[in-house]
Amino acid sequence: MQVIEDFIHIVGMGMMAFQNSYLMTGNVVASIQKLPAASVLTDINFPMKGRKGMVDWARNSEDRVVIPKSIFTPVSSKGKYV
């Protein structure tokens, strides 16, 4: 679970100034494209089927990570959460 929390921190806070980024460590490669929260229409599943270069390593539901769309909260024009 700590890996997921670290990943969310990197995407949410550490990469605030960048729209697209490419991260690589010894055993993980991540390509991140940030989208506005309003564009999230469905739950996000990892690994995402159909993504270019994505190997289908998750063979059952226990191997997958799901981020529900309900956690994305739009920010108002005043900078406060709606």
Image: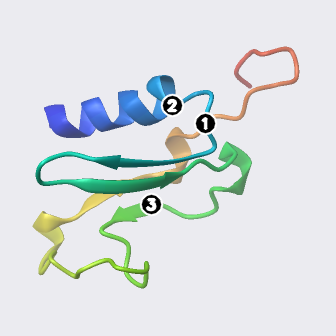
In the picture shown, does residue 44 fall above or below 18? Answer: below
Label 1 Cα crowd, 10 Å radius (few <14 / some 14-19 / many 20+): few
- Say which of 8 and 25 sits in front: 25
Where is residue 43? Give x, y as percent: 48, 61
User: Up-down: is 67 above or below 79?
Assistant: below
Residue at 70% across / 45% down in the picture? 36
Residue at image x 88%, y 23%? 77
Structural crowding at the residue carrying mark 3, measured as other residues with C-alpha within 10 Å and reported as few (<14), some (14–19) or many (≥20): few
Q: Name the spot of residue 38 as percent of width and height, x first.
A: 73, 49
Which sits in the foreground, 52 or 35?
Answer: 52
Q: Is residue 36 left or right of residue 46?
A: right
Q: What residue is drawn where x is 57% and y is 40%?
A: 72
Q: Which residue is mark 1?
A: 18
Which quadrant of the view contains residue 64?
bottom left
Q: Which residue is mark 2?
A: 15
Q: What quarter of the picture does the N terminus occupy?
A: top left
* Marks 2 and 3, how far apart at CA: 19 Å
Q: Residues within 10 Å of mark 2 (few under 14, many from 20)?
A: some
Instruction: Estimate the x, y position of residue 22 in percent, counting from the top left.
Output: 42, 50
Q: CA distance from mark 1 to mark 3?
A: 21 Å
Q: Position of residue 25 (x, y in %)?
A: 20, 45
Q: Which element type, helix, strand or loop, lies under badge 3?
A: strand
Q: Quadrant of residue 61?
A: bottom left
Q: Quadrant of the C terminus?
A: top right
- Mark 3 residue type: Ile
Q: CA distance from mark 1 to mark 2?
A: 5 Å
Q: Which residue is mark 3?
A: 44
Three-letter residue code for mark 2: Met
